[in-house]
């Protein structure tokens, strides 16, 4: 009996020990590690990131169709707050819907279409998307671009009839529905941003090629690419109807709109770029163009154009200031203080991220080149190597009032001592910028795949004060994936 | 050469004659003891004992006889010394109630006859099993492409069927992933002390190697990462062991089953990826995989274990075979550095889970008893 009692005791004691669960007070909860890849081993290009009404991340971009000959599809990913995939969808605005151009100009012989993603916006019951559809010939050379917009359900499927494509002949038709004399079906039209109005109609912006002053819809343009803005109905089971449509731009420049929003005064703020056409006079290089429009798209008085000035990092030791950057905006963040624009300024082969803030009246608040602490130099004495180029693609405001700019650092190199370096190719970039558009010292972070051309394209501030970044991660072999990275407010990758 | 042979022959002959003579003396002494003629016995045995002319068994008989003689001649000091000599020659000398007088029992019980400690040496294999505390992944934690350890994989052509239809649509069917175990080895040196009622304690050091292989498919079967993570630990096991029928076994059975449990403070000596590879896209191999130097792993852990085993008595020593289950109690991975010290995570599409390692181990060992017979002091 003694034997049995002792045996039972030790067996029970052993079971008790082994049944204890592993506990570690310091172990992180699942959401604290947050780097995710989405997609397959094909080329996917991330573009836009939003948080929908369910608190889920919605990512928008493009992906190579399973059959490469079919071109690129729009690609949608929805992930929960932990990054777990909820749904994904992809589809193509099929080439058959472009048959009209082949009837007009058979030599185009459209073979496939490439979708170009621009923005996705949450609306009740689903989403609005806008982008461009480029259709290609048999050798994948784009023959024409069309603005494309559609209303989607929550599963990213198009609502029947709620889609619109605009091409050059649409834009160049006069009020009498006849074509401009110089209209050309190969002119490109593209979509960049869209908002929904209270009456469920949509206002979009983008660009349209080669209008001239004889076009009665072209208020300011004289040749060159023009900003396009239009107000259309876009509802399921209805044919979209034009309410009004305008083109905007500067003389002798190629203009593109990338952003539209409403100001507190219910004006439309349209932000884009104006690229001086060589030999046509006008402003130097590319600049940031703003337009304030009234409710039917007419220009208000104040429509300034801004350029970025700064210090060339390669001549910074002499303090030489430079001008003549080509400033191309890429993204705009709107808050109570106005509009914060990020993009890339370039001067020759050198590229710099910039941030520019304007008020609701398009008045300049601040602007500046964003300097990182990164250098391609392997030592301080090695001045011959240029610093890495930096491109700004996305911006959000952190809870501390400063801004987070994301983008890409080109050919990032890390000094690993003894004048040797470790090359990381193009990396995703995070940097904090203060409210005066000045980069905050030691805040820049780079991360990504060592040998891939990665870039962070958009950023949002989450409800818990963290920073979620959408990026394209290049894993090589023509495979690029969506990557969603969550950081803390200090720009540190979550564990 | 011939002379050497003759010398050897002569030496052997003399030794044999002396041995035969001592055996005869021992037999005579035992007869004298039975006959009550005690006084001449010590003198007759002394020369043979001093010369080492008894065989081992004869020496034990002689020393036992001397102990009895001194007991019955009331020479307490000499009887104690004789008993110590007996116990040195025959540790844990078994008493026979049919033969040994009560006086011998009385004296015997005043002495420490058990070993003062034992030295145990074990070597064996262990099979590690990863216990995931919290899972982390570059892919979808809820997908079919979960991380798996040491197991069968849903590798292409094995468990995943990839089908692409005429329109280029792709479907995959994935079979369940089965985790397995990783192989490692260990060696252990312990100092053991028996107390009473079958209970003994052991404490010592252990060197243990272990490994686990992690496999990850990120989103699809074509983007595959395989990591082989090796660790070595210096461990300090403290063991409480219960031996069944320990006392009876001294005289009757040779096999002693036991159960044990214990705890150990574990110090990480090394930790590294012996291989880390991602396939899919442009393949990537990590060359610098020292996870300890990077601080990706925690350097300290502690663990509990329980085991069962058998001791097979060889004289006063034991051959042991043993099975243990060991569970580590602290996350092997340092979450603070999991990513910050591991930028290659992006390249590998891999990040460590929070995990601990459990082990099933099997060992064979030798336990050597160390004796120092001594009269137990009376503190009354």
Image (cartoon, rainbow, N blue to C red):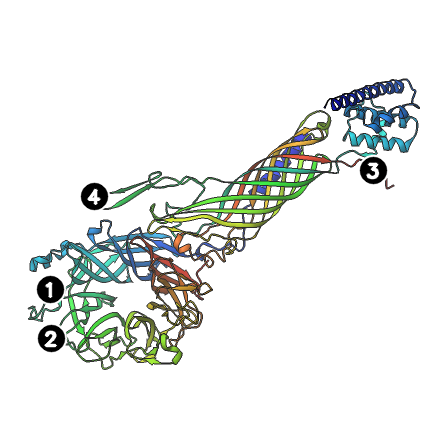
> Which residue was labeled with disc 1?
A185
Residue A107: name its quadrant: bottom left
> Which residue is located at x 38 percent, y 53 percent?
A84
Q: On screen, A190 above or below B110?
A: below
Disc 4, disc 3: CB below 8 Å? no
Residue B367: x percent and y percent?
67, 35
Residue A113: name its quadrant: bottom left
| Quarter of the C terminus of chain B within the rendering | top right
Give the crowd class for mark 3: few <14, some 14-19, many >=20 residues within 10 Å.
Answer: few
Q: Which mark is residue B166?
A: 4
> Which residue is located at x 37 percent, y 71 percent?
A384
Badge 4 sits on which subunit?
B
| Quarter of the N terminus of chain B within the rendering | top right
> Which residue was labeled with disc 2?
A216
> Which residue is located at x 73 percent, y 26 percent?
B251
Q: On screen, A365 above or below B64?
A: below
Q: On screen, B247 above or below A212?
A: above
Q: Is A430 placed left or right of A131 in the picture?
A: right
> Which residue was labeled with disc 3?
B376
**Mark closest to the chain's N terminus, 1 or 2:** 1
Badge 3 sits on which subunit?
B
Which numbered mark, 4 or 2, is in the foreground of this view? 4
Residue A332: x percent and y percent?
31, 70
């Amino acid at each position: 009996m003694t034997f049995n009692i002792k045996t039972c005791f030790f067996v029970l004691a052993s079971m008790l020990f082994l049944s204890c669960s592993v506990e570690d007070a310091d172990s992180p909860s699942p959401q604290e590690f947050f780097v995710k890849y989405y997609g397959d081993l094909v080329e996917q290009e991330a573009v836009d990131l939003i948080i929908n009404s369910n608190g889920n991340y919605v990512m928008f971009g493009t992906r190579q169709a399973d059959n490469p000959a079919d071109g690129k599809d729009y690609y949608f990913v929805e992930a929960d707050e932990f990054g777990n995939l909820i749904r994904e969808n992809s589809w193509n605005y099929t080439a058959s819907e472009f048959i009209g151009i082949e009837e007009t100009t058979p030599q185009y012989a459209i073979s496939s279409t490439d979708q170009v993603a621009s923005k996705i916006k949450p609306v009740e019951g689903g989403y609005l998307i806008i982008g461009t559809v480029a259709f290609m010939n048999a050798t994948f050379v784009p023959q024409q671009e069309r603005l494309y917009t559609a209303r989607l359900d929550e599963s990213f499927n198009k609502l029947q009839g709620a889609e619109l494509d605009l091409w050059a002949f649409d834009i160049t038709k006069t009020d009498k529905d006849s074509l401009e004399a110089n209209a050309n079906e190969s002119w490109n039209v593209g979509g960049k941003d869209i908002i929904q109005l209270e009456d469920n109609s949509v206002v979009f912006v983008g660009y349209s090629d080669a209008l001239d002053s004889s076009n009665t819809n072209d208020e300011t343009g004289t040749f060159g690419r023009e900003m396009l803005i239009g107000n259309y109905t876009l509802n399921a089971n209805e044919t979209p109807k034009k309410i009004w449509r305008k083109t905007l731009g500067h003389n002798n420049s190629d203009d593109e709109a990338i952003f539209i929003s409403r100001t507190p005064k219910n004006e439309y703020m349209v932000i884009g770029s104006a690229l001086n056409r060589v030999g046509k006079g006008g402003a130097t290089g590319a600049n940031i163009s703003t337009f304030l429009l009234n409710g039917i798209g007419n220009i208000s008085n104040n429509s300034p154009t801004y350029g970025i000035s700064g210090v060339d990092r390669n001549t910074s030791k002499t303090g030489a200031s430079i001008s003549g950057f080509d400033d191309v905006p890429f993204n705009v963040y709107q808050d109570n203080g106005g509009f914060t624009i990020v993009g890339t300024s370039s001067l020759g082969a050198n590229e710099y991220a910039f941030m520019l803030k304007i008020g609701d009246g398009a008045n300049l608040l601040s602007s500046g080149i964003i300097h990182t602490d990164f250098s391609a130099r392997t030592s301080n004495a090695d001045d011959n190597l240029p610093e890495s180029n930096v491109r700004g693609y996305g911006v959000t405001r952190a809870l501390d009032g400063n801004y987070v700019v994301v983008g890409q650092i080109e050919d990032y190199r890390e000094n690993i001592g003894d004048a040797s370096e470790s090359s990381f190719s193009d990396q995703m970039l995070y940097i904090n910028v203060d409210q005066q558009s000045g980069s905050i010292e030691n805040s820049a972070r780079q991360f990504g795949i060592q040998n891939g051309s990665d870039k962070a394209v958009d950023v949002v501030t989450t409800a818990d004060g963290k920073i979620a970044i959408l990026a394209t991660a290049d894993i090589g072999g023509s495979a690029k994936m969506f990557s969603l990275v969550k950081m803390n407010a200090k720009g540190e990758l979550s564990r | 050469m011939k002379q050497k042979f003759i010398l050897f022959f002569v030496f052997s002959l003399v030794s044999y004659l002396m041995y035969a003579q001592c055996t005869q003396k021992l037999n005579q002494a035992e007869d004298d003891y039975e006959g009550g003629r005690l006084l001449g016995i010590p003198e007759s045995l002394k020369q043979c004992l001093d010369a080492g002319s008894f065989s081992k068994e004869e020496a034990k008989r002689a020393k036992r006889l001397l102990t009895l003689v001194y007991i019955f001649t009331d020479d307490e000091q000499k009887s104690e010394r004789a008993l110590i000599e007996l116990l040195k020659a025959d540790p844990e000398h078994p008493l026979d109630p049919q033969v040994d007088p009560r006086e011998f029992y009385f004296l015997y019980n005043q002495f420490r006859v058990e070993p003062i400690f034992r030295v145990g040496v074990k070597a064996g294999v262990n099979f590690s099993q990863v216990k995931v505390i919290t899972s982390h992944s570059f892919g979808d934690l809820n997908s079919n492409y979960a991380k798996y350890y040491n197991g069968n994989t849903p590798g292409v052509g094995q468990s995943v069927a990839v089908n692409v239809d005429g329109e280029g649509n792709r479907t995959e069917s994935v079979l369940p992933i089965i985790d397995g175990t990783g192989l490692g080895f260990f060696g252990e040196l312990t100092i053991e002390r028996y107390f009473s009622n079958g209970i003994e304690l052991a404490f010592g050091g252990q060197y243990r190697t272990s490994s686990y292989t992690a496999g990850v498919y990120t989103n699809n079967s074509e983007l595959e990462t395989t990591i082989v993570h090796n660790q070595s630990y210096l461990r300090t096991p403290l063991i409480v062991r219960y031996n069944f029928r320990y006392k009876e076994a001294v005289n009757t059975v040779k096999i002693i089953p036991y159960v044990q449990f214990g705890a150990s403070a574990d110090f990480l000596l090394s930790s590294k990826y012996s291989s880390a590879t991602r396939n899919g896209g442009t393949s990537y191999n990590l060359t610098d995989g020292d996870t300890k130097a990077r601080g990706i792993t925690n350097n300290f852990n502690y663990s509990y274990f329980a085991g069962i085993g058998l001791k097979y008595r060889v004289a006063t020593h034991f051959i042991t075979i043993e099975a243990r289950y060991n569970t580590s109690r602290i996350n092997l991975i340092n979450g603070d550095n999991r990513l910050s010290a591991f930028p290659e995570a992006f390249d590998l599409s891999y990040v460590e889970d929070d995990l601990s390692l459990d082990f099933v181990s099997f060992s064979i060992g030798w336990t050597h008893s160390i004796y120092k017979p001594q009269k137990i002091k009376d503190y009354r």
